[in-house]
Structure formats: C-alpha cells, structure tokens
C-alpha cells in the first residue's frame, strides 16, 4: 500500500521512532486503544479504528513538525520543545540583527511562540538537562565555564543559558557600567554533538557539557558531576495551533488522560462501620469522594475509593487501625475523568 497517498483526511500524530520515549509512548497508544500495525522499516502507520496516521520521527524533530503545522499532534520531551522554542527565538533575533525585521516584528513573532501547544504531561521519561563537568576537574561553578568549550546536542538552550550567565558575570564585574559589546557575541563556544556527549570532556573536545541525565549512571561512569540544571523534563503531548481535526485531538487527549490516571491509581475497596466512615474518608478521600454502599449487616457500609499506587500500603495500614475489614486492592485498566 502507498501509505503517503492514504494520509488525506487523517489526523497526523507524531511518535518517537526510537530512544528512551519510544516504548512508553507505544504503551500509552495501546492503552488509548489506538490500533495500528507498523510495517518493518516504515515510518508511517495507519490506525485501524480511527482516522489517524502515526508518523514515526526522531523526538528532537517532532516539535518542528508540530510547530510548523505539518503534523497535528505529537509525543516528545519537554526538553525538545524548549530547545525548538529557543531555536525559533534565536532565529527571530538573528533576523532582527540583520535588519530583515524590526524589533516590533520580532516581539510580535516571539509572542506567538514556536507553534506548539502543550496538551498534557504524560508522566514518564523524567530527566534533567544539566551542566556537567569532570568530577576531579578545575571547574566547580557554571560561571567557571564562561569562555570555555561546551559540548551538547541542545545548542540553542546551551547558548541561551550561557548568554544569560555571561550577562550575569559581566553585570557583577562592571557594576553599573556596561562594557562595550555587552550581551552581544557569545564568548563561550558551543560545540554541537549528536551523540556520546558524555565523552566530550575525556576526549578533549569540551571543558564541560550540557546533556540529559536520567538515573545519573552514565554521568558517573564518565567521571562527570552535575553543577546546574538547565531544564527539568518529561514526556508531553503537544498539538499544533490549528489541528486538522480538533474534536479528534480532544478525544485522543481524553483517552490518554484516562490511561495515565489508570497507571497512577488503584481501586481500594473495604467494609467499615458507618460511624467510622468520616475518619476513613480522611485517610482515603479519593479523587472526588468515596463511593459508599450500605451492607445487609446493620451499621456497616462498603467503600470504593481511588488511591495513588505509591500511597496504598500505608493507607491500608491506617484503614485497618480504625476498624476497616476485607480490604481489597484492584488495578485499574482504564478510566475517564
């Protein structure tokens, strides 16, 4: 099948084709009942039960496609959206410096942003974009790296970070007297790297790096330590300003929100004397309120309540202390607000 000629009338939904966000994104789609089959080596898959086409792209490219309106919806990292946004702002600034646009036009264009709108945080892929240096090296503070070589794949965020840092250093050095060339050309050299950024210091390519940190194991193995955080990130669902099918975007967002809720909560059920119900509701209030049903036994009620998975064990302990019995915990497969 010529998939490209079957995209008309379908919502285009970009998904990370590989990397740390790929599998979790596919799990979210499965939970939202977005049914598809991806043929080997193809980066387009038609959804069987909804008018959607999935486009498999590098996570770093997804904000560009969504921001320019070529794709309606996408899953990517907040760090990638921020990098794209910083790049767009840098482009507007360069156009102003070259005389292509006026300062007023730059302000207006920057006010419109990068064209991506965040729909919701997906709750996975948490990481930090951090400034890192050799553990036993001479650099202890980010200010020590001003004027040095910085290796990164996040060139726009790194440039913005060190531009702000240079302004701060210069302001402290010159007090109320602004030096010539203040806030103009960046003195710190940003070295663009596409991979294995953590090796840049050991290989003499850079004095420090700006790179993503998840567990920190790779950073430690490379003999590096973090000295500052540029951006805290996780996976997000983004949309273009003018999606082709806003109703379908809302439907997908609603389904994904339900999947996230189901992953976060469990259903706790227990029996308890009615006169202890108020105390039990204080322990486990639920998302809105517990569901209470009268039992055949006089003075007793059955309670169902949603509880965060990470809190369920101590909550069960507290319910037991106040007289709850027959406490059961069940997984939630899916949900709707």
Image (cartoon, rainbow, N blue to C red):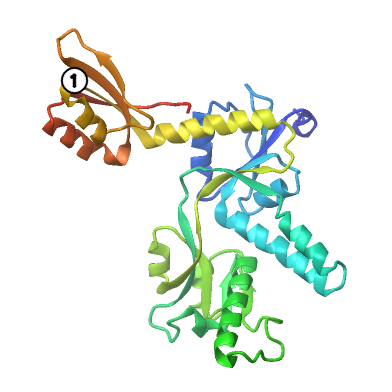
Above or below, 299 relative to 152: above
316 in relation to 133, above or below = above
Q: Could you tell me which residue is drawn at 38 percent across and 69 percent down? A: 220
Does dot 1 land on a helix, a strand or a loop? Answer: helix
138 and 242: which is toward the camera: 242
| Residue 160 rendering spot, x and y as whole percentages | 62, 71
Where residue 226 appears, x then y in whole percent? 43, 71
Q: Residue at x 55, y 79 (%)?
A: 206
Quarter of the rendering containing residue 155: bottom right
Q: Quick check: 79 left or right of 187?
A: left
The x and y percentages for residue 213 are 45, 62
Q: Is residue 34 left or right of residue 336?
A: right
Task: Say which quadrant the N terminus sits in.
Answer: top right
Q: With 150 as the anchor, is 53 left or right in this view?
A: right
Comparing 315 with 234, the one in front is 315
Residue shown at 47% from the left, 73% from the top:
132
> Which residue position is annotated with label 1?
274
At a point 72% along the width and 61% down the height, the residue shown is 88
């Amino acid at each position: 099948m010529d998939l490209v000629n079957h995209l008309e009338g379908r919502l285009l939904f970009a998904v990370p084709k590989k990397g740390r966000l790929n599998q979790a994104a596919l799990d979210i789609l499965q939970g939202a009942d977005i049914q598809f089959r991806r043929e080997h080596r193809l980066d387009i898959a038609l959804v069987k039960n909804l008018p959607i086409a999935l486009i498999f792209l590098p996570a770093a490219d997804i904000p560009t496609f969504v921001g320019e309106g070529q794709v309606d919806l996408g899953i990517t990292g907040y760090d990638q959206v921020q990098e794209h946004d910083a790049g767009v702002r840098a482009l507007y600034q360069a156009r102003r410096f070259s005389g292509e646009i006026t300062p007023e036009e730059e302000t207006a264009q920057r006010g419109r942003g990068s064209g991506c709108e965040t729909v919701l945080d997906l709750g996975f892929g948490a990481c930090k974009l951090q400034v890192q240096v050799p553990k036993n090296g001479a650099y202890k503070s980010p200010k020590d790296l001003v004027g040095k070589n910085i290796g990164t794949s996040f060139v726009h965020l790194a440039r913005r970070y060190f531009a702000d840092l240079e302004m701060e250093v210069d302001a402290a050095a010159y007090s109320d007297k602004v030096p010539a060339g203040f806030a103009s050309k960046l003195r710190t050299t940003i070295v663009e790297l596409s991979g294995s950024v953590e090796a840049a210091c050991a290989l003499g390519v850079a004095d420090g790096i700006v790179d993503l940190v998840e567990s920190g194991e790779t950073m430690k193995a490379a003999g590096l330590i973090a000295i500052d955080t540029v951006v805290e990130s996780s996976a997000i669902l983004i949309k273009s300003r003018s999606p082709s099918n806003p109703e379908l975007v809302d439907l997908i967002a609603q389904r994904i929100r339900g999947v996230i809720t189901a992953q976060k909560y469990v259903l706790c059920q227990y029996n308890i004397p009615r006169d202890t119900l108020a105390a039990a509701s204080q322990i486990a209030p639920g998302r809105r309120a517990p569901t209470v049903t009268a039992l055949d036994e006089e003075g007793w009620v059955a309670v169902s309540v949603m509880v965060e998975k990470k809190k369920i064990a101590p909550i069960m302990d507290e319910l037991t202390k106040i007289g709850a019995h027959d406490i059961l915990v069940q997984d939630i497969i899916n949900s709707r607000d």
